[in-house]
Image: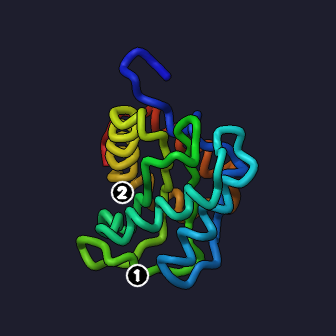
């Protein structure tokens, strides 16, 4: 984390936490499969609690934010530190997004209740980054988690152009 208290997305993710061509067929599938990407993470203390809390948050209001992006997230007792994972779905998924467009890019975030401010800052950072059309297009062309991770690192070092 740098002095502005923003976590670099490329630091939050690892190749094991990225899935390209996620075979989900529904919003619920996406969430279940993505929670599985967090299995074995040293900061995840209760995977099922994370799953329940992300699903509960999604029931309150869709996290489909538009432009083919969803940001399912939760503050949860199931993690000791903020964790994230990312997926590109194999096919467009109806996420009940604000713009009514289906989703292919999904970034999931789970953070401890005590890290509310950090959680909001990370979600905002992810949203700003993935608001760049060029980045969204390039991610859809990625074949491997390593490619996605490299793109995030590259984009975080590039000023916003869209």
Q: Quadrant of residue 145?
A: bottom right
Q: CA distance from mark 2 to mark 1?
A: 20 Å
Instruction: Please provide percent x and percent y for residue 123.
Output: 37, 45
Q: Residue at x 41, y 58 (%)?
A: 71
Give the SS element for disc 1. loop
In this orientation, which residue lies closer to the viewer: 162 or 62? 62
Give the residue number, with chain letter if any, for mark 2.
133
Q: Residue at x 38, y 67 (%)?
A: 58
144 w.r.t. 159: above or below:
below
Give the residue number, with chain letter if any, for mark 1.
94
Q: Residues within 10 Å of mark 1 (few under 14, many from 20)?
A: some
Q: Residue at x 43, y 53 (%)?
A: 74
Q: By what rule are the colours in the image chosen?
A: rainbow
The mark closer to the camera, 2 or 1, is 1
| Label ID, residue 31 | none
85 w.r.t. 34: above or below:
above
For marks 2 and 1 on the same chain, the one whose residue lies earlier in the sequence? 1
Say if residue 153 shows up in the picture: no
In this orientation, which residue lies closer to the viewer: 8 or 132? 8
Instruction: Please provide percent x and percent y for residue 16.
Output: 72, 51
Say if residue 36 shows up in the picture: yes
Q: Is residue 124 left or right of residue 155?
A: left
Q: Residues within 10 Å of mark 2 (few under 14, many from 20)?
A: few
Instruction: Please provide percent x and percent y for residue 112.
Output: 48, 40
Instruction: Please provide percent x and percent y for residue 101.
Output: 32, 77
Give the SS element for disc 2. helix
150 w.r.t. 71: above or below:
above
Q: Residue at x 47, y 61 (%)?
A: 54
Number of residue marks: 2
């Amino acid at each position: 984390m740098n002095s502005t208290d923003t976590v670099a997305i490329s630091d939050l993710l690892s190749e094991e936490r990225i899935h390209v061509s996620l075979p989900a067929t529904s919003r619920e599938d996406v969430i279940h499969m993505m929670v599985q990407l967090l299995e074995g993470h040293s900061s995840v203390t209760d995977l099922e609690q994370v799953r329940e809390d992300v699903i509960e948050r999604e029931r309150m209001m869709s996290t489909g934010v538009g432009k083919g992006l969803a940001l399912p997230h939760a503050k949860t007792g199931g993690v000791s530190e903020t964790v994230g994972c990312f997926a590109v779905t194999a096919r467009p998924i109806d996420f009940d997004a604000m713009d009514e467009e289906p989703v292919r890019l999904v970034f999931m975030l789970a953070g401890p209740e005590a890290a509310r401010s950090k959680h909001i800052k990370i979600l905002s950072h992810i949203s700003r980054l993935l608001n760049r059309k060029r980045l969204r297009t390039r991610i859809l062309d990625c074949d491997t988690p390593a490619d996605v991770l490299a793109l995030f690192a590259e984009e975080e070092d590039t000023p916003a152009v869209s």
